Image (cartoon, helix red, strand yellow):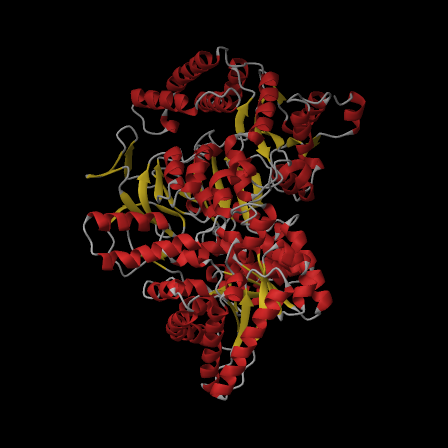
Amino acid sequence: MIEVNDVKKAKYVYLFTEGRAEMKKLLGGKGANLAEMKSIGLPVPPGLTITTEACKEYFQEGQEFLAGLEEEMWAKLTEVEKETGRRFGDASNPLLLSVRSGAPISMPGMMDTILNLGLNEETMAGLIKATNNQRFVLDCYRRFIQMFANVVMEVEHKRFETALEKVKGEAGVKVDKDLAPADLEKLISQYKGIVQEQTGRAFPDNPREQLMMAVQAVFASWYNPRADVYRKINRISDDLGTAVNVQAMVFGNSGDDSGTGVAFTRNPSTGEKKIYGEYLMNAQGEDVVAGIRTPHPITDLQKESPEIYEQFVKICETLERHYRDVQDIEFTIERGKLYMLQTRSGKRTAHAAVKTAVDMHEEGLITKEEALLRVDPDSLNQLLHKRIDASVQLKVVAQGLPASPGAACGMIVLNADKAEEMGKEGKKVILVSTETTPDDIHGIVAAQGILTSRGGMTSHAAVVARGMGKCCICGCESLKIDFESGTIRIKDLVIKEGDIISLDGSTGKVMLGEVKLIAPTLSGEFQKLLTWANDVKRLGVRTNADTPADAAKAREFGAEGIGLCRTEHMFMAPDRIPIVQEMILSETLEQRKEALAKLLLIQEEDFYGILKAMQGLPVTIRLLDPPLHEFLPDTEELAIEIAQMKMKGASPEKIAPKENLLAKARNLHEFNPMLGHRGCRLGVTYPEIYQMQARAIFQACARLIKEDYVVIPEIEVPLVIDKNELSFLRGEIEKVAAEVMTETGIKFEYFVGTMIELPRACLVADQIAEAADFFSFGTNDLTQTTLGFSRDDAEGKFMTPYLEKKILPENPFMVIDRAGVGQLMQLAVKNGRQKKEDLLIGICGEHGGEPNSVEFCHLLNLDFVSCSPFRVPIARLAAAQAQIQHG
């Protein structure tokens, strides 16, 4: 237990006037930014922040408040009372409060908020007298009961919504603001009855008790399921804790001269330099973000209240200049006066992030390096995905608000749990709902796109979808969803759960059926940003490509060569498998060479096409790696086929080849093929296979040089554990090179190296370097053999619980395991370069396109990373960011 004397030395509560923006870790993002806005003279209602340290110690103390915390909070609240001229809990002039979470890293909608706290029958009467507006006060009280009961007392939200809809129906009104005072009094009574029935206790009337219960609930919301999911997706530490912001209420629902809204200083979907947002008059904040009513675009405020709009525009300009970033702002208008309730860096699509980063540099707001750091490399995936083909005739059945760009097709699913379940089965689904809540995040993650019938461009669904790069359409009011029957009615059209629809998040159109999607075109800002990345980065970026088409696509994305060309993929084509099987089934060396001669012609054309596509850039070609049985049919399936042939009376002449194939497949079967007869072990036992591949490469080189192409072949020997393996195979390759040069009369340069993909290879890298021109880390196999994990088994069976229980911080097959695999890589780099100072070292596999792993490769001083073509831009940006951050 923490001693009282120790607590007195620490400060756990700060007034907004005591904080600044740089105190985010302590005050959370919301609290720090409220304090910062206050310090630069913006209209912010007074308040206080309970620190993240108080939250962390609350959990350390078994969910008990620290001794002295309450006294400190009440003392600070007295200062808030002085500034407002109102008193918390006072019957004649009551101060009402909002209680909001605020983590150091923005987690929009993931934790809990309570508004209008401090109301009870006495303070409500005092507020009615003070405002002379009974309807407004009753509306505040019914909202407070609903929010408090849901967040603090865990009463289901839908119970209150059902009661609200019933009272609206009885009153004959469609929207909440049209309910009369008598209707609201009835609703308040019903709400209190729901609380009593569901919790076994009366709704708390004591304002002090309300506040302490609310603070406790906000602390507890740090570990609610939706916050947990959000942190996992966004790799946010569980150890940060949340602050609690207690702020004097201002009321957007106090009449038609009041309102509330959310806005961005630039368009978060496109990056256009224009204020973008929505507002509602006579409403409170949750009405806008929760999608309860469909709001108006912010530009309408210019007509409705030009003075307020002009003031708001100036504040937006001030905040953007001050923070030097796009701001996401919440505001309230109370009786014609504007108040700022929040500002934070705005979540935005990748397209908007790129455009705003480039624009802000060109406007002189930020440096080129800051612009590069503003864009999350992983978010570039959003720019590299498909969109709807404009040439196709579309069957548009509904129109909503274009909340998050992109396109998606999938089966309709009407709840988040089912979306998650079907997503795990590999099915493409579209999550359709009246609106989404933070509790739906698991379904949003699983869905291809989101469609809601209510809500606007800043609703929960819109904000979360944009952050994830998912297509989203909101406010599609023509949808009439019947959850019980699993149907959606759009005028006379009825579609069912399971039917396929398509969404265009850029236009808001909803189409029946599956539509054709095409690859995106990249903006000028995108190309400019990546040009800046090239100017800054040290690390080279290559691609993994097995075909000329892949190579050409990678060049478009800025690949500086091929870091991995997997020759076994060339063998898998249907027209080649019979020749490969002929080679495997050969009984003599002559038979095998005869089959290899057929493959030689095919392989030469493969390498000719790839080397030509990468003209002037290095191409690393990995010689055959997998075990030979992978090119043969499955033994069980083959045995069944033979048995069926015999039952049907097939001739012995037809059965014999199949039986021969089965015998060979069984003979080649291995108990652990990953560690078996594969890679360079094939080259040692069957040198003629690697000789054929080397000849195909060199003959392709000779042809291209004759045609005036510049070629840089790098021949990679896989799975080496010893210098002697590489020395032997290098000798075989060099003999073939000499033969081809003699036969063609053409000289060419080439390099021979190896994949470092086994722990022993890392340990003896200095010896292997004597026979190598280059190393390339094969981190997939290196991870498997270092951790003792079979990737397919690990990811299919136990990786998820390992990550959920935090046994491993990341999936090591997606992010390099720096502590284990990383140490082996570091040793190999150090020892290899001690033996050969100019040794070229890179990495291939998908780790080469993952930003955290790219950073690690930069720190290891590798020469290049290699990844799939569509991850090349991600790797380029990540390499530039690593250079900026680490030099």
Q: Residue at x 59, y 68 (%)?
A: 753
Q: Foreground residue, 301 or 364?
A: 364
Quarter assignment of residue 386: bottom left
Q: Residue at x 55, y 54 (%)?
A: 781
Indicate the position of residue 131 as horizontal and vertical percent values. Answer: 51, 23
Q: Residue at x 62, y 30 (%)?
A: 244
In the image, residue 655 sits, relative to residue 467, either above or below, namely below
Q: Is residue 296 visible?
A: yes
Q: Foreground residue, 260 or 206?
A: 206
Indicate the position of residue 836 as horizontal and vertical percent values. Answer: 70, 69
Q: Is residue 459 visible?
A: no
Quarter assignment of residue 362: bottom right
Left or right relative to 533: residue 394: left
In the image, residue 249 sits, relative to residue 793, either above or below, namely above
Quadrant placement of the C terminus: bottom right
Indicate the position of residue 878 as horizontal and vertical percent values. Answer: 58, 58
Q: Foreground residue, 266 or 374?
A: 374
Quadrant placement of the N terminus: top right
Quarter assignment of residue 717: bottom right
Indicate the position of residue 758 as horizontal and vertical percent values. Answer: 60, 55
Left or right relative to 312: residue 190: left
Q: Residue at x 42, y 56 (%)?
A: 629
Q: Foreground residue, 21 or 315?
A: 21
